Image (tube, rainbow, N blue to C red):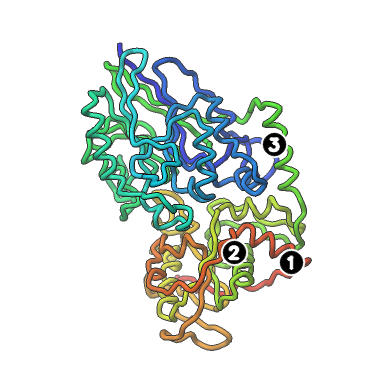
């Protein structure tokens, strides 16, 4: 009887060890804790976002060390991978070294390398021990073109994932395969259970792929939503959460079809001497003192920070203003933030700002600034009884607290007694009102400057300059340049609560 087992990971982001790096405790996570029993009817597949996103990948990139993710994947017998949007963050040489070390084949049909230096193919066919002929293709969201620094994509063409998938599936069907499997670094635009809209852009098109193409199994990622045993238009769909906290096992046979499940990762790990040595060196690096604050900056509950201000975000903005010379700055917090002790270490920085973002300075009018602030004010949801919560648009299909921005360099007021879209009642700078035609310079991360997070207003603004040093490095440089940093007590904005 023909049969198939697939072990699938995605969005591991360089989390190999059983730690989130916030502290020294063991967590049920990390690729080193995963074991995949393998026989001639088993495939091990990864959906991308593999080599950026953790203090480990930051450390290896900074020190010029090879990323250990490829070796870990080779040890576990991976067969196929695709590319994720964050795999481009450190440039093509970093990505090329990873792919050249991998034993697995990289399938990414909508990435064309004009110079032929990246070992990628659009699709593959494999006959398993049971005689099952499996056709596989890979694709990545083409929003990489919006997010990534242009120099990192030089010589690459990232085209429509739908069009590339159509060509790949057509070719696989001509090969006479029994099953077509897509590996898509992108998510679902609709909830597969209820059909409710999850994404209103073409960043995520998994449902459309299933509707338009004869795909038997679609392995998805990017959204970080753990799901198994889902269906859309007859296609079996799965997705893993991020940071190697779960993986998926998919089983298929001729009698029962597909069955899939999310599997937890044990906290215990068996490490080689080389892996233990790297962890020791990494911890030493992370615990290196780097500066002093007048008081620690620990994160609070997310809604409370949004209502009352975040000294951590204010500190990020202070660094961005220092590095850019802009009039004002905006910064967001990651969904999970370690925070800063008063004696700051490198760990505090790289676990509080985990992104490989750089800075962009825009020229913005007062009217455009108000539009951006109104989008931030949509973070708050007001119930009929006056209770304030976080809007579902920032929670579904995945938590996106990183799309709430904190501003420094202006004072502003958000009135939650007013409807969303008309909540910002005052914007002041240097003690006077910012007029709608007044022009200011605004510094932000390159991710936000793409307009992502419903900040399309920034696409209307003139881009004045870019600062290509990563923000985490700028934070480290700022701490080195300022022996002791005083933390202000007052937030630069206020939120007026609903009248009950």
Q: Nearer the viewer, mark 2 or mark 1?
A: 1
For marks 3 and 1 on the same chain, the one whose residue lies earlier in the sequence: 3
Question: Where in the figure is residue 86, as x and y percent of width and height?
Answer: 48, 48
Q: CA distance from mark 3 to mark 2?
A: 31 Å
Q: CA distance from mark 3 to mark 1?
A: 29 Å
The number of discs equals: 3
Residue drawn at the location 39% of the way across and 55% of the way down: 145
Residue 205 seen in this snapshot: yes
**Please, which residue is most extreme toward the top here?**
1
Quarter occupied by residue 208 = top left
Residue drawn at the location 48% of the way across and 41% of the way down: 11
Q: Which residue is mark 3?
A: 278
Q: Which residue is mark 2?
A: 313
Query: Looking at the rendered structure, which numbered label has been put on residue 75?
Result: none
Towards the viewer: 259 or 368? 368
Q: Which residue is mark 1?
A: 481
- Give the answer, above or below, for where 230 lies relative to 88: above
Residue drawn at the location 74% of the way across and 48% of the way down: 287
Q: CA distance from mark 2 to mark 1?
A: 19 Å
The local crowd at label 1, few if under 14, some if 14 to 19, many if 20 or more residues have their Cα within 10 Å, is few
For marks 2 and 1 on the same chain, the one whose residue lies earlier in the sequence: 2
Question: Where in the figure is residue 106, as x and y percent of width and height?
Answer: 42, 35
Circle 3: element type: helix
Q: Is residue 237 left or right of residue 106?
A: left
Q: Is residue 269 left or right of residue 181?
A: right
For marks 3 and 2 on the same chain, the one whose residue lies earlier in the sequence: 3
Circle 2: element type: helix
Question: Where in the figure is residue 447, as x and y percent of width and height?
Answer: 47, 60
- Give the answer, above or below, for where 69 lies relative to 39: below
Question: Where in the figure is residue 348, as x and y percent of width and height?
Answer: 68, 53
Circle 1: element type: helix
């Amino acid at each position: 009887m023909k049969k198939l087992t697939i072990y699938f990971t995605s969005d591991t982001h360089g989390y190999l060890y059983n730690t989130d790096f916030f502290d020294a405790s063991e967590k049920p996570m990390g690729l080193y804790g995963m074991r995949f029993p393998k026989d001639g009817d088993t495939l091990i597949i990864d959906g991308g976002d593999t080599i950026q996103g953790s203090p480990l990948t930051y450390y290896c990139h900074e020190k010029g060390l090879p990323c250990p993710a490829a070796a870990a994947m080779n040890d576990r017998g991976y067969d196929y991978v695709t590319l994720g949007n964050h795999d481009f963050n450190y440039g093509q040489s970093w990505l090329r070294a990873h792919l050249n070390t991998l034993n697995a084949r990289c399938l990414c049909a909508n990435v064309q390398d004009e110079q032929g230096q990246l070992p990628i193919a659009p699709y593959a066919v494999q006959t398993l021990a049971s005689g099952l002929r499996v056709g596989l293709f890979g694709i990545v969201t083409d929003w990489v073109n919006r997010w990534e620094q242009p120099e990192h994509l030089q010589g690459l063409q990232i085209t429509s994932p739908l069009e590339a998938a159509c060509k790949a599936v057509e070719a696989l069907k001509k090969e006479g395969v029994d099953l077509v499997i897509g590996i898509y670094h992108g998510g679902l635009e609709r909830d597969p259970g209820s059909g409710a809209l999850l994404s209103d852009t073409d960043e995520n098109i998994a449902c459309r792929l299933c509707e338009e193409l004869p795909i038997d199994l679609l392995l998805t990622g990017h959204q970080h939503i753990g799901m198994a045993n889902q269906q859309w238009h007859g296609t079996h769909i799965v997705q893993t959460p991020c940071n190697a906290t779960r993986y998926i096992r998919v089983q298929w046979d001729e009698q029962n079809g597909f069955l899939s499940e999310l599997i937890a990762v044990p906290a215990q790990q068996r490490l080689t001497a080389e892996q233990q040595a790297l962890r020791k060196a990494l911890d030493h690096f992370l615990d290196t003192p780097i500066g002093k604050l007048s008081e620690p900056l620990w994160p609070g509950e997310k809604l409370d920070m949004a209502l009352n201000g975040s000294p951590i975000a204010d500190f990020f903005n202070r660094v961005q203003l220092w590095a850019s010379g802009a009039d004002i700055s905006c910064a967001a917090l990651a969904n999970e933030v370690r925070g800063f002790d008063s004696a700051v270490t490198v760990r505090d920085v790289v676990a509080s700002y985990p992104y490989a973002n750089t800075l962009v300075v825009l020229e913005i009018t007062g009217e455009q600034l108000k539009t951006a602030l109104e989008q931030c004010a949509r973070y708050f949801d007001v119930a009929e009884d006056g209770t304030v919560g976080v809007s579902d648009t920032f929670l579904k299909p995945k938590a996106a607290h990183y799309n709430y921005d904190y501003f420094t360099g202006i004072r502003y007021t958000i009135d939650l007694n007013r409807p969303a879209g008309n909540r910002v009642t005052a914007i002041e700078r240097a003690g006077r009102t910012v007029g709608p035609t007044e022009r200011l310079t605004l510094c932000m991360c390159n991710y936000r400057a793409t307009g992502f997070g419903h900040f399309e207003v920034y696409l209307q603004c003139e881009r004045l300059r870019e600062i290509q040093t990563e923000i985490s490095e700028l934070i480290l440089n700022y701490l080195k340049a300022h022996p002791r940093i005083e933390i202000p007590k007052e937030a630069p904005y206020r939120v007026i609560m609903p009248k009950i």
